């Protein structure tokens, strides 16, 4: 199945580049509300499901035992920029768990923003694992390992109790079995299991409303949802889709990007979950697709509309700032969304 | 027409992302030797045709009048990293033309590599226009304007004599008329005209062999070809496809990347020109496509094969260096190339 062109990048009067993709929107009873392209194909959800991977930490009581606050829980679900507050919070989480940066197995990464790179250079420092965009998630994994009484070393391996807990949780939410043959290794060294897009969308519908979940799990979902929408800066950072959109929509939506063009969302007021993948793994493609979904699905205040427009139709600029073109959802994609969702 | 999947990105045992694309290989008599996907579609060639844009500078005698050496001519054809030698050479070219950085209209850009960014930060400097990856090309344009007696101000505008000369040259090489309705603005503010991929491939076939060109033009092609293959570091820089491949193949191929997934090549020993576009604009897609073309087309020494393999099958690594997957040409694409070219 060939997925449709979902996003076009223009220059002058022409389309210069095209992104294809697939999308599933599912309601919290599990009904497929909208499928564009192949919604059955297995997709590595990567960082887009960090909030599901953080559920065992909360459900088990470990988050309370370690006294993690909202900002720290949001950081567990984050792909952050490695800005000061992200690094500091990850460090504090590890201290709360009686651990340190040395226990992180995610590897190091330079911060995303030039300003933060420059700060490190001026201090003559190299970034450690705390700067890895996944450091909060890993601090959460380590905290869970401690509270479970499991070894902290090797917490990234597929057979470690922490990863086993996470796999079981994701299987329950997506309704899909996750076996070794669909397992890959994520950039931060943990297992990532490819799941059908519609299963991932189902997970986010249920995550957003808690429908038919037993009370402890429903409460854990609500707690993580609230943590992320109340502390959106912790989920990504300056000039990032997830942060800007969650901040503007003040609790109406949860959105989370993942590497290789994956994007997920929960929209509790509609009882819907969204999962999408840009075929080629492009960030601009995935962001514009998710922007278009929210554009079509939601009634918006002026502030919400403005925040969204920056991601639905971002300009392509020359280095002196002239607008040479734009990234835009394709007519085909918009029509299909409107037919199914509007 | 839907272009085929040309490049697959794997993770574990699965394909995680897919790039589609189109390609044309044309011989120096203008015969289309291989077309994959839509070779008639107009594509913005962007920086991939810088070597054609540098021809008027050489043909007019301006390069000689300004005493530009091989390294400087290669920099005219470059999308460079903004490393020390690139910045210094662009500065010298401007001095030779009696001009300075202030005359550049390309805008500023931070260097590509962390090391060079760090050097600027430590010196408490911001990059100027000399650091723009196109600064050498612009220094060449300014030099041509001076020698032509044209104003230097506004040399990036479509109706300026320099851009008019370039347009006429590209029209002659591609055999395609370039009109305002297919004109976009490139990232460095100059016009870029969308041309059919097969016309661009034709231009590179003729550029590589000089077939049927009048002597002054053939000589200009040879001079620029030799400048680039003798000074490949000036064309891109550290750890860049164009530099590494031209260095390894010691004059056998000219290759040049362009923004939004365009790649062109001249292969004089085969009398062929290549032009390709990765639909989604992805660099890894375009590089792997071009790597596969050279892989199929050329008999290789051990050194050449090794240099090429790094770009045909680059690994996808975790942040601790584990090989989680790879970028690879699709079977479909490889078969089509072999059928047409092997």
Image (cartoon, coloured by chain):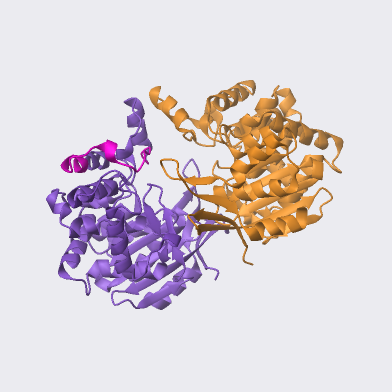
Chain colours: A purple, B orange
Q: Residue at x 35, y 65 (%)?
A: A294
Seen from the viewer's position, the closer of residues A100 and B37 is A100
**Main SS, magenta residues:** loop
Q: Looking at the picture, does residue A199 appear above or below residue A339?
A: above
Residue B322: x and y in percent read 45, 44
Q: Looking at the picture, does residue A91 appear above or below residue A241?
A: above
Q: How many marks?
A: 0
Highlighted range, magenta: A92-112
Q: Is residue B303 left or right of residue B210?
A: left
Q: Is residue B28 left or right of residue B332?
A: right
Residue B46: x and y in percent read 61, 46
Q: Residue at x 24, y 64 (%)?
A: A252
Q: Is residue B259 left or right of residue B56?
A: left
Q: Residue at x 39, y 62 (%)?
A: A290
Seen from the viewer's position, the closer of residues A95 and B170 is A95
Is residue A149 visible to us here? yes
Is residue B252 inside the magenta stretch? no
Seen from the viewer's position, the closer of residues B234 and A322 is B234
Residue A333: x and y in percent read 47, 69
Q: Quadrant of residue B88?
A: top right
Seen from the viewer's position, the closer of residues A153 and A132 is A153
Q: Quadrant of residue B104?
A: top right
Q: Quadrant of the C terminus of chain A?
A: bottom left
Residue B328: x and y in percent read 58, 52
Q: Quadrant of residue A295?
A: bottom left
């Amino acid at each position: 199945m060939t997925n449709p062109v979902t996003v076009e990048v223009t220059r002058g009067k022409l389309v210069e580049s095209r992104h294809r993709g697939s999308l599933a929107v599912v309601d919290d009873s599990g009904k497929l509300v909208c499928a564009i392209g192949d919604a059955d194909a297995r997709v590595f959800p990567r960082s887009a499901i960090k909030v599901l991977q953080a559920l065992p930490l909360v459900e088990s009581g470990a988050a309370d035992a370690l006294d993690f606050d909202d900002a720290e829980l949001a950081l567990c679900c984050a792909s952050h920029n490695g800005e000061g507050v992200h690094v500091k919070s990850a460090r504090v989480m590890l201290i709360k768990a009686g651990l340190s940066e040395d226990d992180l197995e995610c590897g190091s990464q330079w911060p995303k923003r030039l300003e933060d790179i420059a700060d490190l250079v001026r201090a003559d420092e190299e970034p450690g694992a705390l700067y890895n965009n996944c450091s909060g998630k890993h601090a959460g994994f380590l905290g869970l390992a401690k509270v479970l009484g499991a070894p902290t070393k090797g917490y990234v391996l597929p057979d470690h109790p922490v990863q086993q807990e996470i796999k079981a949780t994701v299987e329950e939410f997506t309704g899909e079995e996750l076996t070794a043959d669909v397992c890959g290794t994520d950039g931060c060294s943990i297992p990532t299991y490819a799941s059908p897009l519609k299963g991932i969308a189902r997970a986010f519908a249920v995550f957003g409303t808690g429908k038919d979940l037993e009370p402890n799990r429903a409460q854990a979902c609500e707690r993580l949802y609230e943590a992320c929408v109340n502390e959106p800066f912790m989920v990504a950072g300056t000039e990032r889709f997830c942060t800007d959109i969650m901040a503007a929509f003040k609790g109406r939506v949860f959105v989370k990007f993942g590497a290789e063009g994956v994007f997920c969302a929960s929209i509790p007021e509609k009882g819907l979950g969204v999962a999408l993948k840009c075929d080629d793994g492009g960030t601009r493609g995935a962001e514009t697709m998710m922007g278009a979904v929210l554009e079509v699905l939601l009634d918006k205040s002026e502030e919400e509309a403005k925040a969204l427009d920056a991601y639905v139709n971002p300009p392509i600029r020359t280095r002196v700032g002239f607008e040479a073109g734009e990234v835009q959802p394709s007519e085909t994609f918009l029509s299909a969304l409107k037919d199914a969702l509007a």
